[in-house]
Image: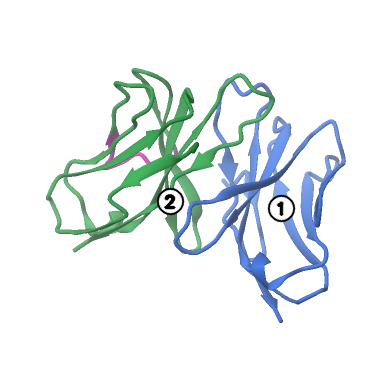
Amino acid sequence: EAQVTQNPRYLITVTGKKLTVTCSQNMNHEYMSWYRQDPGLGLRQIYYSMNVEVTDKGDVPEGYKVSRKEKRNFPLILESPSPNQTSLYFCASSLLGTAYNEQFFGPGTRLTVL
Amino acid sequence: DQQVKQNSPSLSVQEGRISILNCDYTNSMFDYFLWYKKYPAEGPTFLISISSIKDKNEDGRFTVFLNKSAKHLSLHIVPSQPGDSAVYFCAASFYGGSQGNLIFGKGTKLSVKP
Protein backbone atom coordinates (compact mmCIF):
# COMPACT_ATOMS: atom_id res chain seq x y z
CA GLU A 1 0.00 0.00 0.00
CA ALA A 2 1.34 3.40 -1.01
CA GLN A 3 1.75 5.48 2.10
CA VAL A 4 3.64 8.01 4.16
CA THR A 5 4.36 6.89 7.70
CA GLN A 6 5.37 8.99 10.67
CA ASN A 7 6.63 7.99 14.09
CA PRO A 8 5.81 8.57 16.79
CA ARG A 9 2.16 9.57 16.43
CA TYR A 10 2.09 11.22 19.82
CA LEU A 11 4.95 12.60 21.86
CA ILE A 12 5.14 14.54 25.12
CA THR A 13 8.56 15.85 26.00
CA VAL A 14 10.25 18.55 28.02
CA THR A 15 11.99 21.72 26.96
CA GLY A 16 15.50 21.17 25.66
CA LYS A 17 15.36 17.41 25.20
CA LYS A 18 16.39 16.59 21.64
CA LEU A 19 13.90 14.57 19.62
CA THR A 20 13.47 13.19 16.13
CA VAL A 21 10.23 12.53 14.27
CA THR A 22 10.71 10.04 11.48
CA CYS A 23 8.99 10.10 8.10
CA SER A 24 9.14 7.43 5.46
CA GLN A 25 7.41 7.01 2.09
CA ASN A 26 7.26 3.95 -0.16
CA MET A 27 6.25 5.67 -3.42
CA ASN A 28 9.74 6.56 -4.66
CA HIS A 29 8.85 10.25 -4.48
CA GLU A 30 11.59 12.80 -4.96
CA TYR A 31 9.88 15.56 -3.03
CA MET A 32 9.27 15.46 0.72
CA SER A 33 8.14 18.16 3.09
CA TRP A 34 7.32 18.88 6.72
CA TYR A 35 4.41 21.05 7.85
CA ARG A 36 3.05 22.14 11.17
CA GLN A 37 -0.62 22.80 11.75
CA ASP A 38 -1.71 25.25 14.41
CA PRO A 39 -5.21 26.57 15.18
CA GLY A 40 -6.05 29.54 13.01
CA LEU A 41 -2.80 29.28 11.08
CA GLY A 42 -3.44 26.36 8.76
CA LEU A 43 -0.56 24.34 7.33
CA ARG A 44 2.81 26.03 7.38
CA GLN A 45 5.83 24.53 5.69
CA ILE A 46 8.91 23.94 7.84
CA TYR A 47 11.42 22.36 5.45
CA TYR A 48 11.32 20.57 2.17
CA SER A 49 13.56 18.38 0.08
CA MET A 50 13.58 17.93 -3.66
CA ASN A 51 15.88 14.92 -3.61
CA VAL A 52 18.56 13.14 -1.63
CA GLU A 53 20.95 15.60 0.04
CA VAL A 54 18.87 18.56 -1.23
CA THR A 55 16.94 20.39 1.47
CA ASP A 56 15.63 23.92 1.83
CA LYS A 57 13.81 26.10 4.32
CA GLY A 58 10.09 26.61 4.21
CA ASP A 59 8.14 29.37 5.93
CA VAL A 60 8.86 28.48 9.57
CA PRO A 61 12.24 26.68 9.79
CA GLU A 62 13.53 28.18 13.05
CA GLY A 63 14.26 25.56 15.68
CA TYR A 64 14.13 22.63 13.27
CA LYS A 65 16.61 20.57 11.28
CA VAL A 66 16.12 17.96 8.60
CA SER A 67 18.22 15.52 6.65
CA ARG A 68 17.69 13.53 3.48
CA LYS A 69 20.26 10.77 3.29
CA GLU A 70 17.94 8.30 1.60
CA LYS A 71 15.14 8.94 -0.84
CA ARG A 72 12.47 7.33 1.31
CA ASN A 73 13.27 8.99 4.64
CA PHE A 74 13.03 12.59 5.79
CA PRO A 75 13.40 12.93 9.56
CA LEU A 76 12.54 16.14 11.41
CA ILE A 77 14.92 17.00 14.23
CA LEU A 78 14.24 19.34 17.13
CA GLU A 79 17.63 19.89 18.79
CA SER A 80 16.27 21.87 21.73
CA PRO A 81 12.47 21.84 21.72
CA SER A 82 10.56 24.72 23.23
CA PRO A 83 6.87 25.04 24.20
CA ASN A 84 6.12 27.11 21.08
CA GLN A 85 6.91 24.01 19.04
CA THR A 86 3.92 22.25 20.52
CA SER A 87 1.94 21.49 17.39
CA LEU A 88 0.60 18.89 14.98
CA TYR A 89 3.23 17.90 12.43
CA PHE A 90 2.67 16.39 9.01
CA CYS A 91 5.12 14.89 6.59
CA ALA A 92 4.21 14.81 2.90
CA SER A 93 5.70 13.54 -0.33
CA SER A 94 5.09 13.94 -4.03
CA LEU A 95 6.43 13.06 -7.44
CA LEU A 96 8.26 15.82 -9.25
CA GLY A 97 7.92 16.47 -12.96
CA THR A 98 4.19 15.87 -13.07
CA ALA A 99 1.66 18.39 -14.23
CA TYR A 100 0.63 19.17 -10.70
CA ASN A 101 1.95 18.76 -7.21
CA GLU A 102 -0.43 16.42 -5.45
CA GLN A 103 1.16 15.73 -2.12
CA PHE A 104 0.49 12.63 -0.04
CA PHE A 105 0.39 13.24 3.69
CA GLY A 106 1.29 11.11 6.65
CA PRO A 107 -1.14 10.66 9.58
CA GLY A 108 0.47 13.36 11.71
CA THR A 109 2.52 13.57 14.90
CA ARG A 110 1.08 15.46 17.84
CA LEU A 111 3.95 16.95 19.82
CA THR A 112 3.63 18.56 23.23
CA VAL A 113 6.65 20.33 24.71
CA LEU A 114 6.33 21.08 28.42
CA ASP B 1 1.64 38.15 3.27
CA GLN B 2 -0.78 35.32 2.67
CA GLN B 3 -0.81 34.19 -0.93
CA VAL B 4 -3.76 31.83 -0.51
CA LYS B 5 -6.67 32.99 1.61
CA GLN B 6 -9.68 31.17 2.94
CA ASN B 7 -11.61 33.91 4.66
CA SER B 8 -14.29 31.73 6.22
CA PRO B 9 -12.92 29.72 9.14
CA SER B 10 -16.13 27.71 9.35
CA LEU B 11 -19.28 26.86 7.45
CA SER B 12 -22.40 25.04 8.56
CA VAL B 13 -24.76 23.44 6.04
CA GLN B 14 -27.81 21.22 6.21
CA GLU B 15 -27.54 17.71 4.81
CA GLY B 16 -28.65 17.56 1.18
CA ARG B 17 -27.95 21.23 0.51
CA ILE B 18 -25.02 22.74 -1.36
CA SER B 19 -21.76 23.60 0.41
CA ILE B 20 -19.66 26.33 -1.16
CA LEU B 21 -16.13 26.86 0.10
CA ASN B 22 -14.20 29.84 -1.17
CA CYS B 23 -10.54 30.56 -1.74
CA ASP B 24 -8.71 33.65 -3.02
CA TYR B 25 -5.13 33.95 -4.15
CA THR B 26 -2.85 36.87 -4.81
CA ASN B 27 -0.01 35.42 -6.89
CA SER B 28 -0.90 35.43 -10.58
CA MET B 29 1.91 32.93 -11.23
CA PHE B 30 -0.11 30.13 -9.65
CA ASP B 31 -1.47 27.86 -12.32
CA TYR B 32 -2.63 24.80 -10.49
CA PHE B 33 -5.01 24.61 -7.58
CA LEU B 34 -5.90 21.76 -5.29
CA TRP B 35 -8.38 21.08 -2.53
CA TYR B 36 -7.54 18.83 0.37
CA LYS B 37 -9.87 17.41 2.99
CA LYS B 38 -8.77 16.72 6.53
CA TYR B 39 -10.54 14.69 9.19
CA PRO B 40 -9.48 14.92 12.85
CA ALA B 41 -6.53 12.67 13.73
CA GLU B 42 -5.71 12.07 10.06
CA GLY B 43 -3.47 13.68 7.48
CA PRO B 44 -4.95 15.82 4.69
CA THR B 45 -6.09 13.86 1.64
CA PHE B 46 -6.30 15.12 -1.91
CA LEU B 47 -9.84 15.84 -3.07
CA ILE B 48 -9.88 17.60 -6.43
CA SER B 49 -7.71 19.92 -8.51
CA ILE B 50 -7.94 22.34 -11.41
CA SER B 51 -5.49 23.70 -13.89
CA SER B 52 -5.54 27.39 -14.79
CA ILE B 53 -6.41 26.52 -18.38
CA LYS B 54 -9.82 25.34 -17.16
CA ASP B 55 -12.59 27.13 -15.34
CA LYS B 56 -14.36 24.06 -13.99
CA ASN B 57 -13.55 20.54 -12.93
CA GLU B 58 -16.04 18.00 -11.70
CA ASP B 59 -15.67 14.76 -9.78
CA GLY B 60 -18.91 13.24 -8.57
CA ARG B 61 -20.45 15.50 -5.95
CA PHE B 62 -17.45 17.83 -5.98
CA THR B 63 -16.93 20.67 -8.45
CA VAL B 64 -14.20 23.27 -8.39
CA PHE B 65 -14.66 26.57 -10.21
CA LEU B 66 -11.82 28.90 -11.11
CA ASN B 67 -12.19 32.59 -11.92
CA LYS B 68 -8.71 33.72 -12.96
CA SER B 69 -9.60 37.35 -13.46
CA ALA B 70 -10.87 37.54 -9.89
CA LYS B 71 -8.13 35.21 -8.59
CA HIS B 72 -10.85 33.21 -6.91
CA LEU B 73 -11.79 29.58 -6.74
CA SER B 74 -14.59 27.75 -5.06
CA LEU B 75 -15.42 24.18 -4.14
CA HIS B 76 -19.04 23.10 -4.46
CA ILE B 77 -20.30 19.97 -2.76
CA VAL B 78 -23.74 18.82 -3.91
CA PRO B 79 -25.50 17.28 -2.12
CA SER B 80 -23.68 17.70 1.17
CA GLN B 81 -23.49 14.68 3.44
CA PRO B 82 -22.61 14.41 7.14
CA GLY B 83 -19.45 12.50 6.15
CA ASP B 84 -18.26 15.64 4.35
CA SER B 85 -17.78 17.33 7.73
CA ALA B 86 -14.05 18.09 7.80
CA VAL B 87 -11.55 20.89 7.37
CA TYR B 88 -10.98 21.83 3.73
CA PHE B 89 -7.71 23.35 2.61
CA CYS B 90 -7.21 25.20 -0.63
CA ALA B 91 -3.69 25.00 -2.08
CA ALA B 92 -1.91 26.52 -5.06
CA SER B 93 1.19 25.61 -7.03
CA PHE B 94 3.21 26.43 -10.12
CA TYR B 95 2.90 24.28 -13.22
CA GLY B 96 5.51 21.71 -14.07
CA GLY B 97 6.04 20.17 -10.69
CA SER B 98 9.69 21.07 -10.62
CA GLN B 99 9.23 23.08 -7.48
CA GLY B 100 6.97 20.68 -5.69
CA ASN B 101 5.80 23.25 -3.19
CA LEU B 102 2.18 23.83 -2.37
CA ILE B 103 0.97 27.03 -0.73
CA PHE B 104 -1.93 26.32 1.60
CA GLY B 105 -4.75 28.46 2.90
CA LYS B 106 -5.70 28.34 6.58
CA GLY B 107 -8.62 26.02 6.01
CA THR B 108 -12.40 26.11 6.37
CA LYS B 109 -14.14 23.79 8.79
CA LEU B 110 -17.30 22.42 7.19
CA SER B 111 -20.06 21.00 9.37
CA VAL B 112 -22.89 19.19 7.63
CA LYS B 113 -25.86 18.73 9.94
CA PRO B 114 -28.26 15.81 9.49
Residue type at mark 2 is Pro
Residue type at mark 1 is Cys
Task: State the mark number for residue B72.
Answer: none
> Which is more toward the observer, A90 or A36?
A90
Taking the spot 78% from the left edge, 49% from the top edge, the residue there is B73
On the image, which quarter does residue B109 sit in? bottom right
> Which is more toward the observer, B113 or A83?
B113
Q: How crowded is mark 1: few (under 14 residues within 10 Å), some or many (20 or more)?
A: many
Give the CA separation, mark 1 to mark 2. 25 Å
Taking the spot 61% from the left edge, 36% from the top edge, the residue there is A102
Taken as a whole, is the magenta stretch helix, strand or loop?
A: loop
Q: Is residue A60 magenta?
A: yes
Mark 1 or mark 2, whichever is nearer to me:
2
Which residues, given as a range, are shown in magenta? Answer: A59-65
The relative height of residue B42 versus residue A22 in the rendered view (above or below) is below
Q: The blue chain is which one?
A: B
Q: Mark 1 lies on which chain?
A: B
Taking the spot 81% from the left edge, 74% from the top edge, the residue there is B16
Q: Which residue lies furthest to the bottom in this view?
A: B114
Q: Can residue B64 be seen in this view?
A: no
Residue A67 horizontal/vertical position (percent): 29, 27
Residue at label 1? B23
Residue at label 2? A107
The relative height of residue A80 versus residue B37 in the rendered view (above or below) is above
The relative height of residue A50 versus residue B7 in the rendered view (above or below) is above
Q: Is residue A103 magenta?
A: no
Q: Is mark 2 on a helix, strand or loop?
A: loop
* Quadrant of the frame with the C terminus of chain A: bottom left
| Chain A shade in the render | green
On whether disc 1 and disc 2 are found on a single subunit, the reply is no
Q: Which chain carries label 2?
A: A
